[in-house]
Image (tube, grey):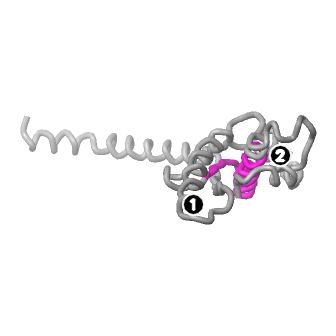
Amino acid sequence: MTIVDLVRILRRNLLWIVLGALIGVMLAGAYVITRPTVYTAQATGVVVAGDSLSVGDTITANSVTVQRAAMYARLANTSQVATRSSQILQQQGMAGVRGGVSAVPGDGSTPFIVVTATSDTAKGAQALANATLLGIRSEALRLETFGKTQGRQTSETELERLTNIHVL
């Protein structure tokens, strides 16, 4: 078979080749049109620890906060954070927001927590990301002050006074 034979075969079947390409493009377009729109939003929090009066204290505090940020990021998918996030969304009048959430710590040298949320509306995705970050904050406060409250119900403001590690 030579190149001339190949050209002859392509010319003879040009209609089928063009028709197949058009059908493929139309099917791909139909697939894209029928997919739901998904919006993604992020909320970033930072973990801080105490006051640093010396360079040594600052380095130690940064090390602690980086470790805590990694630990707190894992809390995003717990039922406690989901429950708290749901309560926060209800308080904001966004109780119907549905979507997915993930959280990752910073790059390993910074005490950041990045929460990514997806939803069917941009406003819902942002509300879900913010509520999840606040849920992580609430659960982190509860964990940091565990045992200091002697089993009594305490507000988040009271819990903040009992620890020097915070998620902002």
Asked if the stretch drawn in magenta spans residue 134, the answer is yes
Query: Quadrant of the rendered structure where residue 7 is?
Result: top left
Mark 2 vs mark 1, CA separation in Å? 43 Å
Describe residue 54's horizontal placement relative to residue 127 as left or right.
left
> Circle 1 — which element?
helix
Position of residue 14 relative to residue 61, above or below, is above
Place of residue 68 in the rendered image (x, y in percent of width and height, measured from the top left)? 62, 46
Which residue is found at the position 53% from the left and 63% from the top?
55
Dot 2 or dot 1: first in sequence order is: 1
Q: Say whether residue 131 is magenta.
A: yes
Reading the image, the residue beneath label 1 is: 58
Task: Indicate the position of residue 101 as horizontal and vertical percent values.
Answer: 66, 43
Residue 45 visible from this viewpoint? no
The magenta stretch is 113-139
Badge 1 local density, few (<14 within 10 Å), some, or many (20+)? some
Report x, y in % for residue 39.
64, 53
- What residue is at 70 percent from the left and 52 percent from the top? 165
Observer-nearest residue: 95 or 78? Answer: 78
Q: Residue furthest left?
A: 2
Tell me the mark number nearer the camera, choosing from 2 and 1: 1
For mark 2, what is the residue? Answer: 96
Image position, residue 103 (x, y; %): 62, 45
| Type of amino acid at the residue the image marks with label 1 | Thr
Front residue of 145/10: it is: 145
Q: Residue at x 76, y 50 (%)?
A: 163
Q: Name which residue lies at 78% across and 47% down.
A: 138
Q: Which one is nearer the viewer's eye here, 40 or 7?
A: 40
Q: Main secondary structure of the magenta part?
A: helix
Residue type, numbered disc 2: Gly
Q: Are marks 2 and 1 in contact (CB under 8 Å)?
A: no
